Image (cartoon, rainbow, N blue to C red):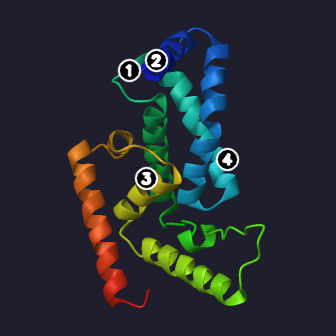
Amino acid sequence: MDHLRAEADLVEKAKTDPEAFGELYEKYIERIYNYVYFRVGSVHDAEDLTARVFLKALNSLNRYRFVGLPFSAWLYRIAHNLIANHHRDQSRRREIPIEDMAVVNVSSRAPSLDASVGRAQETEALWKMINDLSPQKRELILLKFVEKLSNSEIAAVLKKSESAIKSLYHRTLLEMRERMDGEDY
């Protein structure tokens, strides 16, 4: 909690000190960009929306109130809203398929070709399953496992209670297990 308080102090300082806001920007730019990119699938759009997230944060900083969550939860909420507006304006969704994000880690020891192919197929099947989830469940999985946000941070981003996030997470995992047991994944 001390790091959250220190961050809240930095945010307060950033309300009048551009260098303090620069520290917040440097701390979160990569995470926010990645989140936006995974939702829009375009480098150009992700760069534009990320810049707009930080511009909106800077312009709204005086309204920010510390509520016990990291500053990033507020930034993700801004990003979430801008992405929703972007998709609405585009009138069609252009998300990057999650299976395109899969990266197979290669260790210094070369595993057998059969083992590598098997793992790659499992990874591909998992990404396909995640991509087939509803947009809300897919976003939950992205926030939880790609962005590594806590349940309380995800709740702030999605404007839901923490218990609602836990319930959604539980239902999502059950759905994925059922799909694994009964489908072609």
User: Image height check: is 17 above or below 121?
Assistant: above
Q: Position of residue 52 (x, y in %)?
A: 59, 38
Quarter holding the N terminus? top left
Q: CA distance from mark 1 to mark 2?
A: 6 Å
| Residue at 44% across, 57% down | 88
Q: Which residue is mark 3?
A: 144
Kind of residue indicated by mark 4 = Glu
In this rendered view, identify the residue nearer to me: 89 or 56. Answer: 56
| Residue at 71% across, 79% down | 111
Q: Which residue is mark 2?
A: 8
Looking at the rendered structure, the secondary structure element under dot 2 is: helix
Q: Which residue is mark 4?
A: 47
Whether tag 3 and tag 4 are in contact, CB under 8 A, the answer is no
Q: Residues within 10 Å of mark 4 (few under 14, many from 20)?
A: some
Q: Which residue is mark 1?
A: 66
Kind of residue indicated by mark 1 = Phe
Query: Along the polypeptide, which appears first: circle 1 or circle 2?
Result: 2
Q: Residues within 10 Å of mark 1 (few under 14, many from 20)?
A: some
